Image (spheres, rainbow, N blue to C red):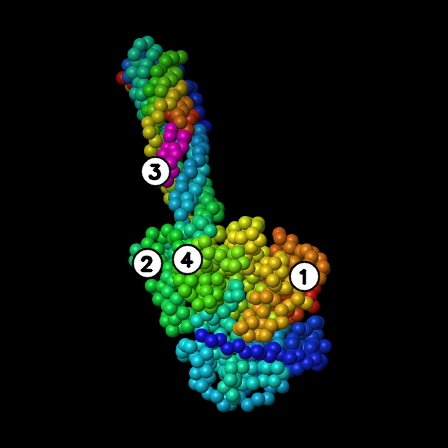
C-alpha cells in the first residue's frame, strides 16, 4: 500500500510573552512550568477558573501511590465542548493545597466549532487511508487542533494499516488530512503453576489456568488478567484482530496440555509481562497499566518465521523485527515480533530472536500502556521522545529489579533488547539502544545533537526513537553518574545502590506530574519537582537529576 | 510437680517398714508391681518434611521438646534363686507438647525464591511403650522392707505425632505468606532395643500386699519415619522415671 507522507508543522510555534510571575507564553500556547510557590499558586488560580468555566475537565484523579496524602489530577483542555488537542494540565495536591502544576494550555481560541465535513465523511477519508473499516468504538472525534499558532477544527481517528497503526487528523472544513503519525509505540523502530522454558533456555514458572484438561496462558494469580495469545503465525488473523475486525477468543489463548511450556515466545511474553506488573506494584504501588488492574494482553507468533522471505518489508519491520503496544487494538495489546529464522541475520550483523525474550523489551512495551493511561505523552517530537525514553527507563529498571547486574544474557544493564538482538559478526553490537552511550546506536546524547525531523510517521514521528537518547542518558547519569561525552559535564549520580530513588523520581514525574505535550525542558522541571517531593530540595537525588539534565544540555 | 511426691512416698514407705516387717514371712516366688509415676527426662528432636508447592519443595522443619510424661507401669518378677529374680515390666508413657514449625515455601512466580513462615503445631502426642526385661537382685534390710536392684534390656516402641504438612494463606504479591496451621501424622517406630537400670523399694503391708516405689532409667534411640520425608529421624526414648504403687506377692 502506498503511504502518503505529510510534512507537518510543529505543534506550537512559540512566541514569547510574559505570563504569571515570569512564565513563558508561547504564542497562544501557555507553557506552565512555575518556578516559585507564588507562581504555582497563580497558575492554580488560573486553572481553577478554567475548570469552573468548563475549559478544563478532569481526565483522571487519584491518590498518590508514592507520597502519602498527595492527590494527583490530570486535566484536559476543552473549547466549547471540544477537546483542544495537546492542552493538558497535571496538578498535585497535598490535602487542599496545590503543590505543583505543569501543563500546556492554549489561549485565544476563536473558531467556529460547526464542522463542514461530517463524521461520516471523515470516517470515509480515514478508512480510505487505512484500507479497513473503522468500528463503531473507533469513531472519529471532533477536536480543536493547534497548528502553527492558529487552530483548526479536525476529526481525529486511528486506522490500522498492514504495517502500522496511524492516527489521522482530517480537517473538518476542507476534508484534507492535515496530520498523521504512528500510534505503534514500538521498540525499534484455576491457578496452575507450570514449568516453562524461555527464549534463552532458562526455566521459568508459568502462571496458567487449568481448563477442561488443558492449561491456558492466562494468569489467575495476579490481580489483573494477564493473558497471552498465540496467533500461530496467521498474519491475516493477526491483522484482523489488530484492526478490531475480529475479536480475540479463548481459542487464541496459548495453551498446553501438560502445563510444561516449551514455546519460548509464549513463555517469556507471559512471564515477563507479569514481572513488569510486579515491578510497578512493588516499586511504586501501581496496579498495572491504568492503575486499576486493567487486563494485560500479549500477542505472540503474529507471523511465521518461515514466511519472512515472502513477507512485505513493512510486515517484516512490524511483525518480525519489532515489538509494539497498541492501545487501540483489541482493547490494548502488546505484540511481540517473531525474530529471524535460525542462521539468518541482518546486514548489520545482528540476529533477532523472539522479541518477547527480552525482559526490558516487554517492560518497555507495557510502559507505553502505562503512559497511555497516565501522562498520555503525545507520540511525536520531544513529547514522543520522552514517551519512548520513559519506556526505556522502566524497561531497564525492571531488568535491574529482577536480574543481577552484568553484561551477559539475562543480566541487567543499560542496553535495550540485548538479550534478543545479538551481534553475530565482528563488531556488531548487542541490543538496539544504549542509555549509557546513546551514540553507540546513532542516538544523540546531548540536546545540541538532537535530530530535527518532520513530525510524521515517515520520519519516526519527529525522531521519537532517536531523540530518546537524550533523556535516556540523563536517567543513566542520574543513577550511575559519569561524564556526558558531548558536554564533558560530570554528574555525581546517586549510585546503583540507590537507583530506586531515581526510578521513583522519573516514575512520579512521568506518570503523575507530566502533561501530555511536555518537551525536554518541561521534563527537567517536572522531574526536579518530583525529586523535591520525594527527597527534598537539594537532596542527593534532586542534585543528581538536575546535574544529569544539565549534562545532556536540557535546561 | 510429680517428682517430689514420689520421693515423699518412698520415704514414707521406708519409715513404716519396720512396723510392717512383723508381717513378713518366707520370700515369695512371684511379685507383681502396678505403678503410676512420671518420666522426668525431656526429649528434644527435629524433623524435616517436604511437600511439592509451585513446582518446588516446601521444606518444613519442626522442633519438638517433650517433657514430664505420665507413666503407667505393670510388671511381674519371679524368684529363681535366693535373692535373684527375673522380671518383665511393661511401661507406658504418654505426653503432649507443642512443636515449633518453620518452613521455606517456594514462590509461585519464581524459582529458588523461598519465603519463610513459622508457627506452632499444638499438642502433639507422644507415647512410649516399653517392655523391660530385668534381672533383679533383692535385698532385705528389714523384715517388711525389700530393696530390689534391677537391670536388663528394654524394648521400645514409640508413637509420635510428627509435623507432615502446613497450610498457609497467600495473597499477591506472594512475598509474605501467613502460617495457618500444621498437619501432623502419628507415626510408630520399629521395635528398638535399649536398656534399663533401676531400684525398687517395697514396703510389705500385708501377707500378699504392699506398697512400692521405684526409680528407673531406661534409654534407646528409636528411628521415626517422617511422612513426606525420605529420611528417618533418630529420637531418644526413655529417661528417668519415678513411680510408686501397689505390690502383690505370691
Distance between the Cα atoms at labels 1 and 4?
38 Å
Between A122 and A317, which is closer to the camera in this rendering? A317
Q: Are marks 3 and 4 in contact (CB under 8 Å)?
A: no
Residue identifier under label 3: B186
Of mark 1 and mark 4, the one earlier in the sequence is 4
Q: Which subunit holds the residue at mark 3?
A: B
Residue identifier under label 2: A211
Residue A170 shows in the view? yes
Q: Is residue B229 magenta?
A: yes
Q: Which subunit holds the residue at mark 2?
A: A
Distance between the Cα atoms at labels 1 and 2?
51 Å
Between A85 and A125, which is closer to the camera in this rendering? A125
> In front: mark 1 or mark 3?
1
Q: The N terminus of chain A is located in which quarter?
A: bottom left
Q: Give how far across and how far down residue A5 sits, in percent.
A: 53, 77
Distance between the Cα atoms at labels 3 and 4?
46 Å
Q: Is residue A96 magenta?
A: no
Vertical order, B184 against B188 (above or below): below
Question: How many residues crowd mark 2 within 10 Å: few (<14), some (14–19), many (20+)?
Answer: few
Of mark 2 and mark 4, the one earlier in the sequence is 2
Residue identifier under label 1: A548
Which residue shows up at 58% across the image and 56% down it?
A414
Which residue shows up at 31% across the image and 18% down it?
B87
Which residue shows up at 47% across the image and 68% down it?
A314
Distance between the Cα atoms at labels 1 and 3?
66 Å
Q: Which residue extends farthest top?
A: B82
Between B64 and B247, which is closer to the camera in this rendering? B64
- Magenta range is B222-234
Amino acid at each position: 500500500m502506498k503511504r502518503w507522507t505529510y510534512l507537518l508543522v510543529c505543534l506550537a510555534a512559540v512566541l514569547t510573552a510574559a505570563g504569571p510571575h515570569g512564565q513563558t507564553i508561547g504564542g497562544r500556547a501557555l507553557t506552565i512550568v512555575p518556578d516559585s510557590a507564588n507562581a504555582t499558586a497563580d497558575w492554580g488560580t488560573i486553572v481553577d477558573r478554567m475548570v469552573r468555566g468548563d475549559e478544563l475537565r478532569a481526565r483522571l484523579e487519584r491518590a498518590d501511590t508514592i507520597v502519602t496524602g498527595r492527590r494527583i489530577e490530570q486535566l484536559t483542555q476543552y473549547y466549547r465542548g471540544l477537546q483542544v488537542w495537546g492542552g493538558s494540565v497535571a496538578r498535585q495536591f497535598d490535602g487542599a493545597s496545590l503543590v505543583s502544576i505543569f501543563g500546556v494550555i492554549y489561549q485565544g481560541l476563536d473558531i467556529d466549532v460547526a464542522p463542514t465535513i461530517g463524521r461520516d465523511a471523515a470516517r470515509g477519508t480515514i478508512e480510505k487511508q487505512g484500507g479497513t473499516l473503522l468500528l463503531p468504538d473507533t469513531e472519529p472525534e471532533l477536536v480543536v487542533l493547534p497548528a502553527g499558532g492558529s487552530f483548526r477544527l479536525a476529526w481525529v481517528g486511528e486506522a490500522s494499516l498492514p504495517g502500522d497503526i496511524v492516527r489521522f487528523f482530517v480537517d473538518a472544513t476542507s476534508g484534507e488530512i492535515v496530520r498523521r503519525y504512528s500510534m505503534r509505540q514500538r521498540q525499534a523502530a484455576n491457578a496452575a503453576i507450570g514449568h516453562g522454558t524461555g527464549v534463552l533456555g532458562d526455566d521459568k514458572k508459568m502462571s496458567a489456568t487449568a481448563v477442561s484438561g488443558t492449561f491456558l496462558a492466562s494468569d489467575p494469580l495476579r490481580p489483573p488478567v494477564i493473558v497471552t495469545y498465540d496467533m500461530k503465525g496467521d498474519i491475516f488473523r493477526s491483522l484482523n484482530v489488530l484492526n478490531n475486525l475480529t475479536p480475540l477468543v479463548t481459542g487464541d489463548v496459548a495453551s498446553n496440555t501438560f502445563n510444561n511450556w516449551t514455546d519460548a515466545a509464549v513463555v517469556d511474553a507471559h512471564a515477563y509481562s507479569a514481572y513488569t506488573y510486579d515491578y510497578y506494584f512493588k516499586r511504586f504501588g501501581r496496579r498495572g497499566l491504568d492503575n486499576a488492574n486493567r487486563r494485560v494482553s500479549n500477542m505472540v507468533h503474529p507471523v511465521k518465521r518461515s514466511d519472512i522471505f515472502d513477507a512485505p518489508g513493512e510486515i517484516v519491520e512490524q511483525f518480525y523485527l519489532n515489538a509494539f503496544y497498541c492501545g487501540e487494538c483489541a482493547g490494548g495489546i502488546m505484540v511481540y515480533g517473531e525474530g529471524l529464522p535460525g542462521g539468518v541475520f541482518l546486514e548489520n550483523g545482528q540476529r533477532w530472536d523472539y522479541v518477547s525474550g527480552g525482559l526490558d523489551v516487554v517492560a518497555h512495551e507495557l510502559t507505553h500502556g502505562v503512559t497511555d493511561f497516565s501522562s498520555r505523552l503525545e507520540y511525536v517530537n520531544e513529547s514522543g521522545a520522552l514517551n519512548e525514553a520513559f519506556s526505556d527507563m522502566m524497561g531497564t529498571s525492571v531488568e535491574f529489579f529482577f536480574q543481577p547486574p552484568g553484561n551477559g544474557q539475562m543480566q541487567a544493564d543499560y542496553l535495550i533488547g540485548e538479550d534478543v538482538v545479538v551481534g553475530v559478526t565482528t563488531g556488531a553490537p548487542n541490543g538496539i539502544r544504549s542509555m549509557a552511550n546513546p551514540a553507540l546506536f546513532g542516538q544523540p546524547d546531548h540536546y545540541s545533537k538532537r535530530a530535527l525531523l518532520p513530525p510524521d510517521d515517515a520520519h519516526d514521528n519527529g525522531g521519537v526513537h532517536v531523540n530518546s537518547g537524550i533523556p535516556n542518558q540523563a536517567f543513566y547519569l542520574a543513577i550511575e553518574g559519569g561524564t556526558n561525552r558531548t558536554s564533558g559535564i560530570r554528574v555525581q549520580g546517586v549510585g546503583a545502590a540507590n537507583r530506586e530513588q531515581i526510578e521513583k523520581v522519573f516514575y512520579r514525574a512521568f506518570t503523575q506530574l507530566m502533561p501530555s505535550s511536555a518537551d525536554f525542558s518541561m521534563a527537567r522541571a517536572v522531574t526536579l519537582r518530583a525529586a523535591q517531593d520525594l527527597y527534598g530540595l537539594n537532596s542527593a537525588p534532586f542534585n543528581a537529576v538536575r546535574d544529569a539534565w544539565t549534562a545532556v544540555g536540557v535546561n | 510437680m510429680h517428682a517430689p511426691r514420689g520421693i515423699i512416698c518412698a520415704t514414707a514407705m521406708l519409715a513404716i517398714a519396720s512396723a510392717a516387717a512383723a508381717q513378713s514371712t518366707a520370700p515369695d516366688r512371684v511379685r507383681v508391681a502396678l505403678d503410676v509415676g512420671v518420666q522426668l527426662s525431656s526429649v528434644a528432636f527435629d524433623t524435616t518434611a517436604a511437600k511439592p508447592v509451585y513446582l518446588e519443595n516446601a521444606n518444613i522443619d519442626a522442633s519438638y521438646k517433650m517433657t514430664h510424661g505420665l507413666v503407667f507401669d505393670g510388671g511381674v518378677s519371679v524368684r529363681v534363686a535366693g535373692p535373684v529374680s527375673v522380671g518383665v515390666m511393661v511401661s507406658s508413657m504418654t505426653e503432649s507438647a507443642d512443636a515449633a514449625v518453620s518452613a521455606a515455601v517456594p514462590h509461585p512466580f519464581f524459582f529458588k525464591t523461598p519465603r519463610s513462615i513459622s508457627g506452632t503445631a499444638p499438642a502433639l502426642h507422644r507415647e512410649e511403650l516399653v517392655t523391660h526385661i530385668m534381672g533383679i537382685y533383692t535385698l532385705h534390710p528389714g523384715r517388711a522392707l525389700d530393696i530390689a536392684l534391677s537391670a536388663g534390656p528394654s524394648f521400645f516402641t514409640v508413637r509420635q505425632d510428627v509435623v507432615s504438612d502446613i497450610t498457609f494463606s497467600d495473597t499477591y504479591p506472594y512475598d509474605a505468606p501467613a502460617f495457618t496451621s500444621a498437619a501432623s501424622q502419628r507415626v510408630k517406630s520399629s521395635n528398638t532395643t535399649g536398656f534399663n537400670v533401676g531400684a525398687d523399694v517395697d514396703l510389705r503391708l500385708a501377707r500378699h500386699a504392699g506398697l512400692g516405689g521405684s526409680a528407673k532409667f531406661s534409654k534407646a534411640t528409636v528411628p521415626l519415619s517422617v511422612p513426606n520425608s525420605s529420611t528417618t529421624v533418630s529420637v531418644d526414648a526413655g529417661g528417668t522415671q519415678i513411680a510408686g504403687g501397689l505390690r502383690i506377692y505370691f
